[in-house]
Amino acid sequence: MTVNGMARELELDTRTTLLDALRERLQLPGTKKGCDHGQCGACTVIVGGRRINSCLTLAIMHGGDSITTIEGLGTPEKMHPMQAAFVKHDGYQCGYCTPGQICSAVAVLDEVKAGIPSHASGDLTAKPQVTAAELRERMSGNICRCGAYSNIVDAITEVSGRKA
């Protein structure tokens, strides 16, 4: 698999989740283990351009895939625009869910750009719009215990280029 642009070869037990492979074998601690049941979104990473809960998938299923974790989006010196927007809009609070929130937010904007409808889409044939309701629906799989949801929506809206 390719992780954050680097080809990686791992020898793993077939029961190892992608989350555990990233954190324990590749030493990428940004992807968080929250509920370990796919309910909180703290473990969200981008695989082949789509966001997934890495706790719900086995690493062995991703041979040949391109995986992006929070570490692959940017660095403190050169942040991804979404990371910078989260800082600017205080969308991180305690920070535990933030890596998953940011990975999900990056993928959400790609979904909207690709015209993929969500449950909030009134017309499935129309191009999705970046609205607060649309973003809240698409981000609903990412839980924030601190309740920074409005700040997160503001950050995503800024990166989308839409005026609030």
Image (cartoon, rainbow, N blue to C red):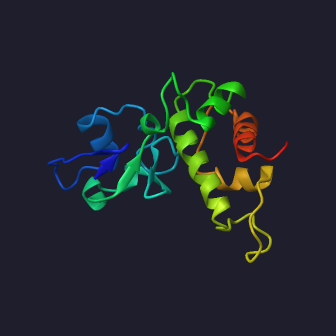
Q: Which residue lies most toward the bottom here? A: 125
Q: Nearer the viewer, residue 78 or 67?
A: 78
Q: Position of residue 95 (x, y in %)?
A: 55, 27
| Residue located 71% across and 51% down the image | 135
Q: Which residue lies most toward the right here? A: 164
Res 152 visible:
yes
Q: Is residue 74 above or below residue 14?
A: above
| Residue located 64% across and 53% down the image | 109
The quarter of the picture where the C terminus appears is top right
Q: Is residue 71 left or right of residue 16?
A: right
Q: Position of residue 54 (x, y in %)?
A: 40, 50
Res 146 visible:
no
| Residue located 49% across and 40% down the image | 42
User: Splitting the image into 4 quarters, where does residue 34 fall?
Assistant: top left
| Residue located 32% across and 41% down the image | 22
Q: Position of residue 91 (x, y in %)?
A: 67, 31
